[in-house]
Image: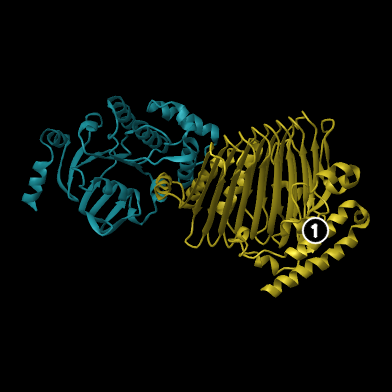
Amino acid sequence: MDSEKKDIREWYQTAFADFENTLNGGASLPFHAVRKKAIARFAELGFPSTRNEDWKYTNVAPLLKHQFQPVTEAPDIAAESLAPFLFKGLDADRLVFVNGVYSEALSSVSNLPDGIILDTLENAFTTHAETVTQALGKTVSYEDETFSALNTAFARTGVFLSVPAGVVLERPLYILHVSKTDGREFLAAPRNLFLFGDNSQARLVEGHYNLDGGTSFKNSVTEISVGAGALVEHIRIQDESKEAFHFATTQVEQATGSNYTSVAIDLGGTLVRNNLNVHLAEERCEAHLIGFYFGSGRQLIDNHTMIDHAVPNCESNELYKGILDDRAHGVFNGKVMVRPDAQKTNAFQQNQAILLSDDAHIDSKPQLEIFADDVKCSHGATVGELDDESLFYLRARGIGEQEAHAMLRLAFARDIFNYIKIDAVRERLEELVVERFNNKA
Amino acid sequence: MLSIKNLHVSVEDTEILKGVNLEVKPGEIHAIMGPNGSGKSTFANVLAGREEYEVTDGEVTYLGQDLLDMAPEERAREGVFLAFQYPVEIPGVSTSHFMKTALNAIREHRGEEQLDAMQFLKLAREKMQLIEMDEKFLHRSVNDGFSGGEKKRNEIFQMAVLEPKLAILDETDSGLDIDALRIVANGVNKLRSSDNAFIVVTHYQRLLNYIVPDYVHVLVDGRIVESGDKNLALRLEEQGYDWVKDNDAVTA
């Protein structure tokens, strides 16, 4: 086991040397020095074991059995093959990445309001060097954590979005990641940077899909800065292949009076780990962390969230729901930190799971650390089964058993989907989830 | 239409029905009356296919088929309907989606065309009027936060939409005030025809003032101990159940 870990660590170091050679001019930019430090730090940190408290329930051993190759070129895919991942009737700007590589041909961006910068990170390294250099890595450090280090080392591109103060992004921005492995096990390390100016407004939709059922390793890091009074809705739909390893870290920094909502839906992946960290750095912020996951087979879906109430008068609201079938394993670790200064904090957390099989299980760990005394905080965790009475009621009206099951599962998830305010996205997502319920393989 | 012979049913190893016989023909209304714990609800539920009930003996033939061999949804598609004593609340499923799905499942079974959303809504509105329910209930989650009376009316609404051949009303009168009782009974009476039949399971005679039964059966301790016409219900109302219980003791 330990030797396997060491071998695979060396594998990524060797892969890094090859990766450097593919960067061409990119290797001479300042960020490349950061990459080098990150791979060195990765070599020191190594992969976590379950002795590490943050990885207690999630064993990354299956990831270490593969030798994933950093992507240099993406396969061509036909525009028509994106159809299942688009939202009917939705007027959105769309950036498409294939195996983590930006595809201009598949993307479609209209005229954006003045002052908005929307580009690939790769381009932004040169076109907006100063802004990017200042902001990138400011909130997610490669020093602290293995997967962030690995992302930093192999980060080639991603999305750079900067919305100036007071600007409202009318159309949602859809960031669509599709993968097609063609039998090659690849590593993609998307790196995104979103800067929302004071009083700006935006809706982001992220989609992660697969076309051929292959094995891949996506390890992304997204840094989001939400300016004072800004309003950001961030929807994330992950429906990768059942062989995919999906690791995603999202770090959100909120300034005074800002409002950030994350709705994270996880349906695919063999091993999924989402880290969502929100830092309420200034007063009167509001954060909503909403999630739904459905696991079957031997899927492992792990949601780690951290809400840091650093100052008074902020509110956080967290609701995660999951349905687990077969031998699927869910993990929910919800940490809420209320620091000594953070009086008048309101922090609510709920996580609920439904287990459809005796072999499915959930590890649920609410972690409230409260150091202020004038606060309202609550948490609740429930684990249950589908209600037999409801099932009989539906069947007694002529609805088939399978459809009745799907209706009740969807009903369980309904309040999560209701957080998605874009009708076309919510409706498509409901269809997708019902498809998964009816054909879990 | 329905032929029940020597039906024995147990719940968790306790025998509840101990040999029930009943013949129901199209166009008939049968009332099943009996004291608490006599097995009335078990009788209603076992006909709808509730799985916790174990049939240990006897047979039930419905339209020439073995009813006991059919899944609950198959029974419903063949025209069996149970109005629940305790309708279930299902947050997150709208009444209209629920009923549209159910009706289309039944129509598909009958080889009829599916109704689209508009066609269904038109039908549902008509049926809502029949039982004097506001159509806003269509958009609310099934029974979620409904009062007792609203839930019972919703059962009759569902019956009106699905147009069963054999409807079993399990204590539909309980929890209804006088107005609601009249509305529910009117709804049932409007749905009566020479092709369908009703089994009205009730503790009290009051619903039978409005829904006049052709036959009244008294269920005591898992057996039908007395059968008669509507006058039997009146006698039970006046004299209670003790005399039939005694009667049972004599004949047993």
Q: Position of residue B187 (x, y in %)?
A: 34, 30
Left or right of residue A438, residue B236 in this image: left
Question: Where is B163 relative to A123, above or below?
Answer: above
* Residue drawn at x 39%, y 53% as measured from the top left: B71
Q: Position of residue A154 (x, y in %)?
A: 81, 58
| Label 1: few (<14), some (14–19) or many (≥20) C-alpha neighbours in 10 Å | many
Question: Is A225 or A404 nearer to us in this picture?
Answer: A225
Left or right of residue A61, residue A379 in this image: left
Chain A shade: yellow
Does residue A136 appear in this view? Answer: yes
Question: Is A88 or A294 nearer to us in this picture?
Answer: A294
* Residue drawn at x 78%, y 70% as measured from the top left: A10
Residue type at mark 1 is: Ala
Left or right of residue A132, residue B134 in this image: left
Question: Is A48 or A246 nearer to us in this picture?
Answer: A48
Q: Position of residue A100 (x, y in %)?
A: 79, 54
Looking at the image, which residue sits at the far left? B250
Question: Is A225 or B213 nearer to us in this picture?
Answer: A225
* Residue drawn at x 89%, y 52% as measured from the top left: A30
Quadrant of the rendered image containing residue B198: top left
* Residue drawn at x 50%, y 63% as measured from the top left: A359
* Residue labelled with disc 1: A38
Does residue A324 appear in this view? Answer: no
Kindly indicate which chain is depicted in cyan in the rendered structure.
B
Q: How many marks?
A: 1
Q: Chain of mark 1?
A: A
> SS for tag 1?
helix
Q: Position of residue A186 (x, y in %)?
A: 77, 62
